[in-house]
Structure formats: structure tokens, C-alpha cells
Amino acid sequence: MIIHIENLKKRYKKEWVLKGININVDTPQIIALVGPNGSGKTTLLNCMTNLLSINEGKVQLVGKNHNDPSIFKEVSYHQDNRILYGHLTGYDHLKFICNVQKIPLKAIDPVCERVGINYLKKQVRYYSLGMKQHLLLAMAIINQPKLLLLDEPLNGLDPTSAITMRNILLDLYAEGTTILISSHNLDEIDRLTNTIFFMKDGSILEESLLDLNNRHYEVLVSDWNKAKQILNEKGIAFSVTNQNQIAFSENDLNLQTFIHLMNDNEIIIEDIDKKKIGAEKRYQELFEGIGST
């Protein structure tokens, strides 16, 4: 069991902000947590990681109680940049994590190369918002977690950085990491996953696998000829666009299966374009009339 949440309730004074949350995840996947501001998303993540105490219910992560400190050998939580210390450098932050978790310092350079950080010697107070997000991601994945929790990781990212972030998350998933991501960026959510927990007023309204029969993807890969050969060998129906993108329907091939196939054959996924947006449409149906997201 990767995530097991049973009837989780959280109260601030007399106000219930989480009202009986139930989530079960048994196999690696990417899951989105979507809802308006104030719906309880960050509170849920904080309760899951024992940063906030719970009033009722049960939470287990990677098979252990959420208040067991040893879970952080296998679980990471990407919070917002308020946890960073402005007078410390990026290297200082990563070194601290390595020292606490007994990770060799030689792990710092590879994770920074993966995320695209080349400013480790600067004090964090001189970082842009996007640079801080990159550092937070490096801090979250340096321990190679089995479960990665992310709270608004796309905030402050330009389009290029958002694509990089998406590809890193897809690669982590292909390597066996389960990812729970809270985000308002519905377009990116659609590119990452079909599994969405919609939250409102401290409750999960529904778990949704959106428009599976109508999803159509166009994927740009590093070697489309090799990708074609692999799909042909598997007998999977697909086509190639005039931009040399691999196009297929969810009826013929599940997106996450495609990601695994490409990863197993060392083909890099450079971009994913989903032709029918599901999350935004469902969000509008569930939260029509709510102004701020």
C-alpha cells in the first residue's frame, strides 16, 4: 500500500477543514489533487506528512504510519518556497538534506544536472521564483523517493521550465515513483495523468478518470523512427503527424503504458499534447460559480 487514508478529519478550533478523506493507492501512478483555494489541498498534504496533527482517521504512507519519521527515507514533500532560507545557498540546502538522511554528497551534482540547476553557490535570497522551484524539486528527489508529494510545483515557472518539470515527473513515474501533485494548472494536469481527486470544502467530490474513450495524444519523442518500430512490433495502432509526433488514442494505448515503453527503450519524451482537455471541463462542471482557483 503506497497511500492509505481512512476517514481523515482535521479541525481548526471549531471548523472542520478536512471532513472524512479516503484515498487508497496500491500501485505507482501520478495522481492530481484539484480544487479551489481553501478547499483543503495543502492541509491534506500537511496532515499526510504529519506536519499537522489529525483529529480523526488513519494515514499510512509506503506501508508505515504517517507519524513514523522513517517514512522520509522513502517519501518526499515538495512544499512552497517559504521553507527555504534566504541567507543559505542552494548547495547548503541540499547538503543539509544529505547529512540528515545520510545520502552521499556526490548525489548533489547528478540531481542538479537532472533538474537544470547551475546556481548552487548563490544565496537563495537572490533566486527568482522559478529558480526556487527548481531547488525545491532537487531537494525533494535527491533521496529517490517511492512517494513524491508536490504542492503547486509549477508556480512561477516559464513555459520551458514547466515542460522540463513535466518531463522530470514523467521520468520519475516511469522509474516507479508514485506522485501526488496539487496544482491549479489544469492543462499540465491533463498532460500528466488521468487520475484526479477533485476537492471542495474539505471533502473529495470524486475520483475521476476523465474522458478515457475520447482522449487523443500527440507526443514528440527524441527518436520517432525507433518509437514507430516499437509500436509496430507491439501491434499498437498509431499515426505520425506532419511534425513527426506519434499520435494515438487512449482506446489503443494508455498514456502511462506509452511512457513506460519509451523509457524502457531509452527514448526521451519531449512534449505531450492532449487534444481533448478533460480536467478543465470537469472542473468547470464541479465548481461553476467559484471565482478564484
Image: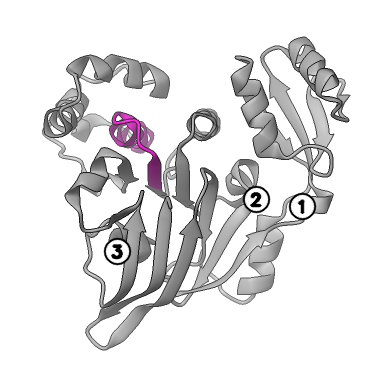
Is residue 242 depicted above or below 138 in this figure? above
Disc 2 from disc 3: Cα separation: 24 Å
| Snapshot quadrant of residue 127 | top left
Q: Nearer the viewer, residue 48 or 154?
A: 48
What residue range appears in magenta? 129-149
Is the residue marked by circle 2 packed among few (<14), some (14-19), or many (20+) residues within 10 Å?
Answer: many
Residues at discs 1 and 2 in contact (Cβ within 8 Å): yes
Disc 1 from disc 2: Cα separation: 8 Å
Q: Is residue 167 highlighted in magenta?
A: no
Q: Which residue is mark 1?
A: 212
Circle 3 SS class: helix
Disc 1 from disc 3: Cα separation: 31 Å
Is the residue marked by circle 3 packed among few (<14), some (14-19), or many (20+) residues within 10 Å?
Answer: many
| Relative to 172, 144 lies left or right | left
Q: Which residue is mark 3?
A: 47
Spot occupied by residue 291 in the image (x, y as percentages of width and height): 55, 71
Spot occupied by residue 259 in the image (x, y as percentages of width and height): 64, 30
* Residue 136 appears anywhere in the view: yes
Q: Earlier in the sequence, mark 2 or mark 3?
A: 3
Indicate the amino acid at tag 3: Cys
Q: Which residue is mark 2?
A: 194
Indicate the amino acid at tag 2: Asn
| Snapshot quadrant of residue 207 | bottom right
